[in-house]
Amino acid sequence: MKKRTQLILAVAIIAIIAVSIAAYYYLTVPPERTIKIGLVASLTGPGSAEGADMQRAAILAVEEINAAGGVYVSEYGRNLTVTLEIGDDKTKPADGVIAVEELIKSKNVDVLVGGLSSSVTLASQVPAIDNNVPFVITGASTPQVTRRTDKNTSYMFHYCTIIDDYSETIVKFLNHTVRPTLIDEGRMDPERNLRLAMLVRNDAYGIGCYDTTVRFINDLGLPIEIVEYQKFEPGATDFTTQLTLIQAAKPDAVYHAGLTAESSNLVKQGLQNVGLKTIYIAVEVCQTPQFYEILGSWGDYQILESKFGSKAASYSDAVDTYIANYMQRWKDAQGNPIIPGMMGADTYDAIYLICKAIENAGTLDKAKIRDEIENIEMDQMLIMMKNGMIWFDQNHEIDPISFIEQMTWNSTTSQLTTYIVYPDSLKQRDFELPPDYENEYS
Amino acid sequence: MPLEISLSTLVQIVIWGLINGCIYVLLASGLNLIFGVMKVVNFAHGEFMILGGYVSYWVSIYAGLNPYFSIFVSIGVIGIVGVLTERVCFRRVLGTSKLNEIVLSLGLIYVLQNAMSVLWTDKERQISSPFEFITVHFEIININMRLDLLIVIGVTVLIMAGFYILIKRTKIGRAIRATSQNRSAAMLMGINVEYMDMFSFGLGTALAATAGTLLAILFPALYPQAGAMPALKAFTIIVLGGLGSTIGAIVGGLAYGLAESSAIAILGGTWRDAIAFAILILVLVIRPTGLFGEKEA
Amino acid sequence: MTRPLLLSVEKVTKSFGGLIAVKNVDFQVEQKEIVGLVGPNGAGKSTLLKIINRFYRQDTGTIMFEGKDISRLNSHQVCRMGISGTAQIAQAFPDMTAIENVSIGVLFGKPGRTSVNEAKKKAVEVLRFVEFSENKMETLAKNLNIAELRRVQLAKALATDPKLLLLDEVTTGLGHLEGERAIEIIRKIRLRGTTILMVEHIMKVIMGLCDKVIVLDHGEKIAEGTPKEVANNEAVIRSYLGESSDCSK
Ligand SMILES: Nc1ncnc2c1ncn2[C@@H]1O[C@H](COP(=O)(O)OP(=O)(O)O)[C@@H](O)[C@H]1O
Ligand SMILES: [Mg+2]
């Protein structure tokens, strides 16, 4: 090798080392303080449809807030941007605990949001409780997440409907709307009770739906009886035997409580495989794009209890704007816009309320943030509230309005759309029985 | 659970038992074949089934092939995958120790599941049938049946008849039976037993692929982890029917399907999977050789 | 007179763990010859046969068959080349009938294609040749007695049209009459011109049948020659007297 080549080589090596060292220092300079929000979502497992929706909604909310300049935190005397850290609970309790611990310990999040399945969240909230990290739960429907007595839940907040709300709305809808319709159409003897069948997931959520239904029927003294009660295991894909037994009980309607895939498939199997032509009432948990996608035309005339109508005709400006932005932001692999779901809407609202609470607190101190969430008072956003305001009661729960949607299959667009049919204050259309509806009288 | 079940409800429950049974028959026959010839329990059998479902899913979507025809593509593809798996993985550990074989097939479960996750995500899928909206009415028992159900039964009968003839009547069938009955005698009689291993593994996984396709036509049961439970049930079925017995796997599969739907009907939906373990334990305690097995192996 | 060489075993050694079952054994079998392999229990006779039919791999040494090196081949390959035999413990396919058992040999044990039906005919022929009872032809092997199984096993071996037949203790465990009949059958096979390498305990049988006898003891060849030479060999007498009295009967 020539001397000159050697020299060039030596210089090059020194230069590379120097640049590397400089880059190392440059990159390891402590990053600017941001507001770190940890999202706990089920990105894999049976809750992945809902989890993906929560993730998309959270990203959208954070992007909007940052685009508007971030959140003013007086302690820092300036606006801080928000960063989102995501933990996958894999729809399993043990993995949920791991995900939350990681968000707290290695990602150092300031606040947590999310938590889908009841059983998973009851486990995954424990590290948040133990470390005093405020957690706004936007998915799990069991009231236990803020009411459990074995742990101090003062840092836990529940921003979504609870099981009691679903069953209350459904039972009232059956009594107020379905029963009179059946009587009017000569499908039911006015003297007899409405025959309801229930098919639920064998877990805290599904069984909770059954228990609360029984309770509301009794407490309100409604002319409804449960003629068949069947369960399925989480993740089940075959519901035919249960549906056959339900068919044998000749119900007027079926209230089913599953996650998106379970609920949509059981409706499809009931109509397609078993020939149980009735009204299937799903719970808002299923308010995801996948629900409509799996149901397809089988969803025609079917019912969904909800508090966020992603497919409904316009009922709120805030919701319309959100849906438009969401569909603008998120497209599937084929470039088609993705339709937002309900759990995402909860999560979206929750991120705004968290930022508002931080702004009110003027600090990133977790205890102060907790206090401000507890005392939050702001205008309702996507989820409609009974008094129009977002606030938490003594159980750290909100007071949302839920409603009933009926789906309609549009064969020209090959899409399901929905109309609100209950309560009267929000009603867009009258409830109609499916044309091929069958009950005892058919 | 209403005790006064009507006849048509009973018939429907039986039909559902038999339809699920068809899928179990296909799955268990393949597992049984592999066990018979190689004396290896292929714990990853359920994953081959799901992989077969995915192949049919792909072919029916991208090639627009009727899913019932895509079964043949799936049989071919999974058959080859099975042959390669035997050649590359099982051949190396066969006969070294039972533990090695078990660890290998358990390992395969995770490899295949993760590969499927990467290729198709964790989303549940269903193969849509062109006959989705067609139902057939049976006047005598007053039942409407989806056409697909009848086709599934028909396909299973055809495939199993073919399989039965292959095993009982053909030359290669004799070689398979000889190898499973006495491996060393078979090789001393000029049978290339390693070739039999490859062939049986491929044929067994191809049967699993058929089961996976039919399953995915009927149920949204196509996701990477969906094979675990059915594989366990197939194992229960071959224990029930008697390890190595072809007829045992057929009768056992149908009986198991019936047991499962009656368990749901009588005990409730949460018993669906538990019944597999209950039967397994019961058979092992009462008649370890199974219904069609020999008293002495 | 010298006949062309059929089998040549050269310096073959085989051990199981620490135990050397066959040690540096050399011998040759000529065409149409009947060679007896004798020696006390545990001498390595069965092991040697199983090395020749490739059931076991030897540790060292070479085996030539019809001038070809078969030391690296598998059982099914040498079977098709013409080496077949019976094992000391009768081997059969338990859930197949006698005919099916034998037809496996016809179908797979020799080169060329045979249909399932042809194989069945040939199987019946061979079973008759070994004087297998007509009314048990369709009986499952698992329901046959030892003597019947032995015949099925022999028929299976013959069904492959072997050039070299390896027989391991054909008469052991049979009653006197059955043993006599078995020897008659071996004579019939001999008449067909098949080369035979047989392990046998009963000296009288060896004396009456074999052209040549090889004696193994503790895995080593200690003598080789005509039956007469071997019977008078001192080493052989010593090894037999020192061991169990199995061979004196
Ligand atoms: N598969 C085996 N594993 C271990 N040892 C064996 C095996 N087969 C034979 N042996 C041993 O090798 C020796 C020779 O056995 P074998 O060939 O059966 O003797 P023979 O047939 O002359 O009575 C014996 O000590 C026997 O215990
Ligand atoms: Mg021996």
Image: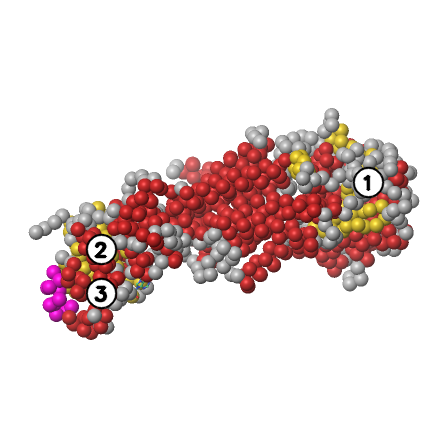
> In the rendering, at what x and y percent does residue B222 appear?
61, 42
- Confirm whether residue B212 shows in the render: yes
Asked which secondary structure carries label 2, the reply is helix
Q: Residues within 10 Å of mark 2 (few under 14, many from 20)?
A: some
Query: Which residue bears the numbered disc 3?
Result: C201
Q: Are marks 3 and 2 on the same chain?
A: yes
Query: Which residue bears the numbered disc 2?
Result: C185
Q: Residue at x 58, y 39 (%)?
A: B152
Inspect the image, locate mark 1, and give the three-letter code of the amino acid beneath it: Tyr
Which of these two is toward me, A48 or B58?
A: B58
Which of these two is toward me, A99 or C14?
A: C14
Direction from residue B273 to residue A300 in the image, left or right? right
Which chain is home to disc 2?
Answer: C
Which chain is home to disc 3?
Answer: C
> In the rendering, at what x and y percent does residue A370 appear?
82, 53
Direction from residue B25 to residue C245 in the image, left or right? left
Q: Are marks 3 and 2 in contact (CB under 8 Å)?
A: no
Tell me which segment is drawn in magenta.
Answer: C226-236
Inspect the image, locate mark 3, and give the three-letter code of the amino acid beneath it: His
The C terminus of chain A: image quadrant: top right
